[in-house]
Image (tube, rainbow, N blue to C red):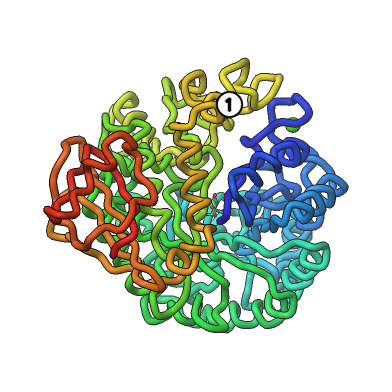
Amino acid sequence: MAYQIYPKSFCDGNGDGIGDLRGIISKLDYLKDLGVDILWLSPIYCSPCADQGYDISDYYQIDPQFGTMEEMDELLSEAKKRDMYILMDLVVNHCSDEHEWFQKAVKDPEGEYGKFFYMAKLPDGKLPCNWRSYFGGPVWEQIPGSDWYYFHAFHKKQPDLNWENPKLRQAVYDMIKWWLDKGLAGFRIDAIINIKKVLPFRDYPADRADGLCSINTMLHEARGIGAFLGEMRDRTFAPHDAFTVGEVFDEKDEELPDFIGDNGYFSTMFDFKETIIGKSPKGWYDSRIPEPDEYRDNCFLSQKRSMDVGYLSNIIENHDEPRGVSHYIPQGDCCDRSKKMLAALYFMLRGLPFIYQGQEIGMENTVFHSIDEVDDISTLDEYQVALAAGMKPEEALQAVAHYSRDNARTPFQWNGEAYAGFSTAKPWISLNPNYTKINAASQAQDEESVLHFYKKLIALRKNPEWKETIVYAETVPVLTEEKNLMAYFRKGEKTLLVIGNFQREARTVQLPCEIKQVLLTNCERIQTQGVQAERQELHLEGYQVIVAECK
Ligand code: GLC
Ligand code: CA
């Protein structure tokens, strides 16, 4: 089982309001006790933090706000003592404009380091292409005081690295090897689908009033990323036997085996099918929250397409997404029981489950009173997009708040005391005010808590009796004609039934198999009368989930 840490918001070890390595080290026993095997740290390299560390100015240094290289080494060895593996974030589609490479490129755009980036002059006064960067505006930015422009798919402080240049690729591989030699187990690989561009640059039809087009239009057309990814695997990951998980959006179905099949580019990659349901090309303001059945259908689609290919990594949230419980559970119904249901439904799927920090205690989306409270550059951009679409400021804030990446970035709620036990100082970003009710300390005391439910799920997945089936067995959807119900078998050494009533109302369904024993449920009291084997019917309370062994 894997766990994502967003270091800035996990635990502050030195009392400056910013989470750090010392804080992470202090929580290793908590993570071990939860059952974590693999820890992925969002970026902790030197960074001016325009995009919270996803803009790296030195790949070989730890940013002082997070600690020192000695502390990183300590983390690696402390994790090893506990049989835990550490993954870092590999952000190599772009670096920071403050990286030495870019600083040199700016001074001499036609020189060696200029070729590490995409640089252009505009002889006819027109940008080389009309693509819109992910965080808004054109992908081209002028170098101040120069007639040169550079390309950035994300923020203007994140210039894209030119993967067509073998020297750049070599520099990236050297850096990867350096970290693996240090004892790192592998990487989560950021935004990797962006490294291959359609060249030469050209315009696509505009898709918004700004005259620009989504960068995705170009990505759909781009071919040949495999040559880069295969080379990276062969030169870096494979010789070290490194574990890798790709952040890959929109890969073509027929490409899946290349990515995660035998000798694929990565060990696994995230399943984002559910995350993108309802997202509008117009922007967050126009997006809609998924229905339970859409969530189910997309999970099953991913299970099906990966079954004979490899393993996807399953998530309900991460540092870029709303909190899963606030997003997938219908509004007004977010409670301990529904949180546990969602947990079991995704956790029991075939694949590698990732837990994002705080998910295990059921942390929820936060509240924003004003746009001034927002830190995330993506939210600030989407707010402008909503305003441009004609929304009033209040409406625009409401419309984008649900999707704000800050929802997942509020400090971890360790206890109900000052600053939620995250720090002794005011945190860098506001706490979710619900920390007095939702926190790890109180849940640790409560056998019925979301935290304990996660522990049971993790223990079940590791139990030698069930492990084989939970990890490897095929997922077979059942009762798919039922509305607001997600049910599936895992058919392997044993047969398991996972069934969740994705609605407030109780219901009775035909049992698709005879139950031998219930392994886990979130409504302990009704478990026995619920499973009426002789009538082959199953009573489910609202948001009840059951994991059972079939006869
Ligand atoms: C990935 C990261 C996100 C970041 C972007 C640019 O999508 O998860 O946080 O903003 O890449 O690096
Ligand atoms: Ca700190």
Look at the image and tell me whether residue 499 can be seen.
yes
**Residue at (21, 53) in percent of width and height:** 293
Residue situated in front as seen by the camera: 524 or 470: 524
Can you name the residue that lies furthest to the front here? 534
| Residue 306 percent across, percent down from the top left | 39, 73
Q: Amino acid at mark 1?
A: Ala
Q: For this rendering, which residue is in front, 234 or 376?
A: 234
Q: Is residue 44 left or right of residue 78?
A: left
Q: Is residue 412 left or right of residue 240?
A: left
Up the image or down, 394 lies above or below 139; here it is: above
Residue at image position (47%, 70%) is 311
State the quadrant of the C terminus.
Answer: bottom left
* Circle 1 Cα neighbour tier, 10 Å, few/some/many (<14 / 14–19 / ≥20): some
Which quadrant: the N terminus? Answer: bottom right
Looking at this view, is 505 or 134 the one in front? 505
Q: Is 338 above or below relative to 193?
A: above
Q: State whether residue 126 is above or below residue 77.
A: below
